[in-house]
Image (tube, rainbow, N blue to C red):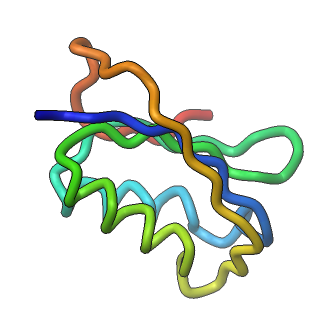
Amino acid sequence: MDEAVIVSITGKVQGVFFRADTRRIALGHGLAGYVRNMPDGSVQALFQGDTTGIEKMLAWCRQGSPHSRVDGVTSQSVLVREDLTGFDIRY
């Protein structure tokens, strides 16, 4: 059964290929969703898929991409969206 979480990642996470790496890793775990930069300098992501894939993705978010520095990760369960397919970088 699928689940979905919305995640906020803070730190040095913009301008360091964080979104591109997030998309690549999420697709590798078979997750749907999106990732986008937020005006406050954080990155927001929605991950939808199986529990194991989401847990692995959250662990990756806590570490971040090679040039990033993650200060914090918060996540909250949200309703599963039946219309969500693929994984997008939103602008």
The C terminus lies in which quarter of the figure?
top right
Question: Is 12 located above or below residue 5 in the figure?
Answer: below
Residue drawn at 20 percent across, 59 percent down = 52
The N terminus lies in which quarter of the figure?
top left
Residue 2 coordinates in the image, percent (x, y) = 18, 34
Residue drawn at 47 percent across, 60 percent down = 20
Name the side, left or right, on which 38 lies relative to 6.
Answer: right
Q: Nearer the viewer, residue 70 or 51?
A: 51
Quadrant of res 25 = bottom left
Residue 35 coordinates in the image, percent (x, y) = 52, 43
* Residue lying at the far left of the rendered structure: 1
Name the side, left or right, on which 79 lies relative to 71.
Answer: left
Name the side, left or right, on which 59 lies relative to 2.
Answer: right
Question: Is 52 located above or below residue 30 in the figure?
Answer: below
Residue drawn at 52 percent across, 43 percent down = 45
Question: Is 30 located above or below residue 88 in the figure?
Answer: below
* Residue lying at the far right of the rendered structure: 40
Count of numbered tags: 0
Residue 23 coordinates in the image, percent (x, y) = 38, 55
Residue drawn at 76 percent across, 73 percent down = 71
Residue 89 coordinates in the image, percent (x, y) = 48, 41
Quadrant of res 57 = bottom left
Name the side, left or right, on which 17 lies relative to 20.
Answer: right
Question: Is 14 located above or below residue 88 in the figure?
Answer: below
* Residue lying at the far bottom of the rendered structure: 66
